[in-house]
């Protein structure tokens, strides 16, 4: 057990940080080792992996999955699931690009409208989950179809091309010449998520609602509100991912984000969050997403065909989660 | 004398078809521990739920410190200083002690964020007050059940509760943990908190309470001073009703042939050193209060749960029962207590539910012999008088009594030698009860031996040839013939006669 460190008044900030870091490492020891072993293995096979260019590349490619996975962590902690994020990526991308290309909206207005579309889909999920007895799996499965269909209807099934530097810079630009813009968004989102989960009532209540709904009710927590907020956040994050992706592809594509929800869920589960709800950490999810990102980058560097990549990815997920379950059981 | 801390007067509450409370009441002084005692279904929980704002009474008044209050929802109860510690623990498993204590009313910093430091410092004070050497940052899941219970109590106290209700607080605690709970209760008394203590365990009531209020069938029976009463007097108050002769059964099994013997069966923390035997054609009743370990014992015998030590003999031979299938092959059948969760496939038809255990009888290879199945099903529908329009009716649409008969018939179809019935008449109407009793009678005449777990004393007394009374996972006594009386059963079921 950790010593009672707060006995003599306040902890110093450095103590807090070092405490947080050691706690993080201890909690995620298993997958951290997995990630490091994976990196070492890949860099032995192909030393290019460790080049700063490639590492930034990995981060940039992983960042959209991380947006989704961070929000997915909250939804799963709540005892829910969100299958609709992949389709929301497509519909927000299509709406944003249509507004710019067809209707000539200023980029920032179109982006705001795209984010709003994502939030609305998320809020709809949350509202239906919170006010009916339809299981979240079904609700978001339905929304997944609706949003995908909407993307096809709006775009008439064809990519919507955008010729705008300022729009393209959203996803492809660099900050200070080295930091990819999507990674900057990721850092901002991580800070916000950290504050939500650790500093606000909202974060605490997510654990309460997912861990013991009865206790949450007795404590007078507004369960509906918590659910609606979490799903709305998930929709918003899908919107951010949709805009970043369409910007990088110079077009809004109705097929974008196909199966993205499954990568996000895989990252969450790899990160040690229980599908049963009530437990889990954003930090673990970040490592989980990194494992998935490093793995596909490494397989690309090694020239493994994308067909085989699916098989490798599936196998790694199965083994990693099984190892985690065994480890947790032995701890008890 | 000043006003009572709490007065509940003439509280009446009825549910469709049942009078749960009939002018029941309770008077609580500040700084006292007041026990609420009664059989299963006497109305204790209902009364507490009225106090906690979960049920609205149809009639009656509640006074706190002499002031009349209305308690319409959970938060009203809290506002009036009432805090209820439920039998099941309601904490959030993956939050820390501090976060659980302040769940729903977190202190905030000036910038609007949760003030974790204040929560931790204050929680630490509470933990120290109760002599608990725990880090407030510890996650609830890492605590023992007893520690979690203490956190529930601390949570209640931190609400500044003046009235704390503890519903069976010791049911999952070890003796040592009970001791520390009692210390806590004594320190609460010193702070002038009034405690309503619900427990079936008499020795606990004599140790910790000041007054005991007895309820029976939803009515107030009386309040006695703990110091001036006896176990016998309390039992008399609890059962003091005349037995209605719902079913009279000619008893007296002639045979001495033993079918089932259980020797020294134990499972850590659940049952301890249980021994009994079952004769051919006998109905052996199992009585005891909720949590005495009756169903758990049967689950061990039937191979649903493992046991640590002991042995089971069938017809004089040792048997190894590791899973329900083994038990079935040995001629055992078990009709569980909760037919909806553990027994029936509600959305399936009557015939499906009946024949699921005996499918190999009419499935030969790939061929299903519908005709044989149909005959079987019709046979039981007639035999047990199951009221269903046809065999394809969905079980959900049958009455409780007929559902129970479907479940019994499923097991009869396996032609068991020993039939274990767990609360066979719970939730069925009087007519169906009678029919189930007749079925049981017919079965024992055919030589089947029946173990019947029941919480209804009249049923146990009228139906059983012998009665095993259980208390805290042990056999309190085995009653025979004339000894089978309400007072005797209740005496042993509440821990009387224990060395």
Image: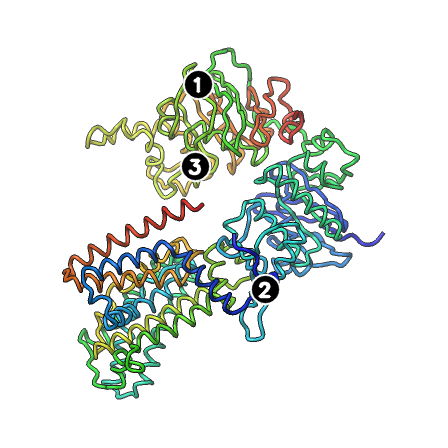
Task: Please name which of the two marks, 1 or 3, marks the residue nearer to the observer.
Answer: 1
**Which of the marked residues, 1 or 2, is nearer the chain's N terminus?**
2
**Label 1: which secondary element:** strand
Q: Label 2, label 3: how many angstroms apart (C-alpha)?
A: 46 Å
Which mark lies nearer to you, 2 or 3? Answer: 2
The span from disc 1 to disc 2 (Cα, nearest Å) is 57 Å
Provide the chain ID for the residue under circle 3: B
Question: Which percent across, then down, holds residue A330?
Answer: 41, 44
Question: Residue A55 versus residue B397: which sits nearer the camera?
Answer: A55
Do labels 2 and 3 touch, CB within 8 Å?
Answer: no
> Could you tell me which residue is drawn at 66 percent across and 25 percent down?
B499
Q: Which of B261 and B153 is in front in this view?
A: B153
Marks 1 and 2 in Cβ contact (< 8 Å): no
> Going from the N terminus, do you reach mark 2 or mark 3 first?
2
Q: In this view, does A57 lie above or below B491?
A: below
Q: Which chain carries label 1?
A: B
Residue indicated by mark 1 = B313
Inspect this view and state whether residue B115 appears. Answer: yes
Whether discs 1 and 2 lie on one chain: the answer is: yes
Image x and y of residue B491, in percent:
66, 28
Residue identified by numbered label 2: B105
Residue that label 3 marks? B403
- Left or right, A150 with respect to A220, comes to left
Going by the image, does A129 lie left or right of B224?
Answer: left
Disc 3 residue crowd, few under 14, some 14–19, many 20+, Cα 10 Å: many
Residue B79: quadrant of the picture = bottom right
Residue extending furthest right? Answer: B1
């Amino acid at each position: 057990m950790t010593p009672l460190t707060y006995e003599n008044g306040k902890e110093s900030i450095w103590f807090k940080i070092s405490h947080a870091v050691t706690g993080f490492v201890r909690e995620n020891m298993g997958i951290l080792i997995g990630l490091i072993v994976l990196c070492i293995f890949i860099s032995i096979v192909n030393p290019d992996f460790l080049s700063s260019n490639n590492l930034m590349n990995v981060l940039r490619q992983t960042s959209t999955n991380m947006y989704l996975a961070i929000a997915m962590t909250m939804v799963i902690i709540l005892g829910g699931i969100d299958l609709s994020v992949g389709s929301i990526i497509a519909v927000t991308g299509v709406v944003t690009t249509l507004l710019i290309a067809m209707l000539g909206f200023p980029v920032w207005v179109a982006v705001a409208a795209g984010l709003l579309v994502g939030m609305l889909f998320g809020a709809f999920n949350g509202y239906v989950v919170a006010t009916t007895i339809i299981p979240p799996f079904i609700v978001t499965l339905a929304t997944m179809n609706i949003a995908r269909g909407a993307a096809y209807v709006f775009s008439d099934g064809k990519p919507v091309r955008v010729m705008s530097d300022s729009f393209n810079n959203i996803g492809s630009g660099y900050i200070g010449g080295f930091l990819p813009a999507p990674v900057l968004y990721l850092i901002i989102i991580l800070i916000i998520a950290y504050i939500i989960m650790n500093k606000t009532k909202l974060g605490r209540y997510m654990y309460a609602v997912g861990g013991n709904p009865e206790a949450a009710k007795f404590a007078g927590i507004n369960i509906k509100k918590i659910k609606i907020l979490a799903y709305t956040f998930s929709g918003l994050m899908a919107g951010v991912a949709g805009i970043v992706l369409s910007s990088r592809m110079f077009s809004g594509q109705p097929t974008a984000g196909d199966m993205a929800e499954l990568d996000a869920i895989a990252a969450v589960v790899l990160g040690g969050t229980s599908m049963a709800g009530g437990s889990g950490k954003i930090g673990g999810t970040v490592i989980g997403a990194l494992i998935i990102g490093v793995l596909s980058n490494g397989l690309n560097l090694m020239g493994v065909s994308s067909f085989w990549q699916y098989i490798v990815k599936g196998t790694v997920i199965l083994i990693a989660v099984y190892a985690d379950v065994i480890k947790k059981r032995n701890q008890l | 004398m000043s006003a009572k801390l709490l007065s509940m007067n003439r509280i009446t509450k009825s549910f469709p078809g049942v009078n749960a409370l009939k002018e029941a009441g309770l008077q609580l002084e500040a700084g006292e521990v007041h026990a609420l005692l009664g059989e299963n279904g006497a109305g204790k929980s209902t009364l507490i739920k009225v106090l906690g704002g979960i049920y609205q009474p149809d009639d009656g008044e509640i006074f706190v410190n002499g002031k009349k209050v209305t308690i319409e929802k959970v938060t009203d109860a809290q506002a009036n200083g009432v805090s209820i510690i439920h039998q099941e623990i309601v904490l959030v498993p993956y939050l820390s002690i501090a976060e659980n204590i302040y769940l729903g009313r977190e202190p905030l910093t000036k910038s609007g964020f949760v003030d974790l430091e204040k929560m931790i410092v204050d929680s630490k004070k509470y933990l120290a007050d109760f002599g608990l050497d725990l880090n407030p940052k510890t996650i609830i899941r890492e605590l023992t059940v007893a520690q979690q219970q203490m956190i529930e109590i601390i949570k209640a106290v931190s609400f500044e509760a003046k009235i704390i209700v503890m519903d069976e607080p010791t049911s999952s605690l070890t003796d040592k943990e009970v001791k520390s709970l009692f210390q806590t209760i004594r320190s609460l008394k010193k702070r002038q908190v009034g405690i309503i203590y619900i427990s079936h365990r008499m020795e606990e009531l004599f140790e910790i309470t000041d007054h005991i209020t007895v309820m029976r069938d939803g009515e107030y029976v009386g309040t006695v001073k703990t110091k001036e009463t006896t176990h016998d007097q309390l039992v008399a108050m609890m059962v003091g009703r005349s037995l209605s002769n719902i079913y009279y059964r000619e008893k007296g099994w002639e045979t001495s042939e033993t079918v089932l013997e259980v020797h020294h069966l134990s499972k850590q923390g659940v049952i301890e050193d249980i021994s009994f035997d079952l004769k051919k054609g006998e109905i052996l009743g199992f009585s005891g209060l909720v949590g005495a370990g009756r169903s758990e014992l049967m689950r061990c015998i039937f191979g649903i749960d493992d046991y640590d030590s002991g042995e089971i003999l069938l017809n004089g031979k040792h048997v190894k029962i590791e899973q329900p299938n083994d038990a079935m092959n040995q001629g055992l059948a078990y009709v569980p207590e909760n037919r909806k969760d553990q027994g029936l496939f509600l959305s399936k038809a009557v015939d499906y539910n009946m024949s699921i255990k005996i499918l190999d009888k009419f499935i030969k290879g790939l061929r299903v012999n519908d005709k044989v199945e149909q005959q079987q099903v019709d046979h039981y529908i007639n035999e047990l008088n199951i009221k269903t329009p046809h065999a394809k009716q969905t079980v959900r649409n049958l009455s409780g009594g007929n559902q129970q008969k479907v479940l019994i018939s499923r097991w009869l179809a396996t032609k068991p030698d020993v039939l274990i019935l767990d609360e066979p008449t719970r939730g069925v109407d009087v007519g169906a009860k009678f029919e189930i009793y007749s079925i049981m009678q017919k079965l024992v005449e055919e030589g089947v031996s029946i173990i019947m777990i029941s919480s209804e004393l009249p049923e146990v007394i009228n139906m059983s040839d012998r009665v095993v009374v259980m208390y805290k996972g042990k056999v309190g006594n085995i009653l025979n013939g004339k000894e089978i009386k309400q007072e005797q059963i209740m005496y042993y079921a509440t821990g009387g006669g224990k060395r």
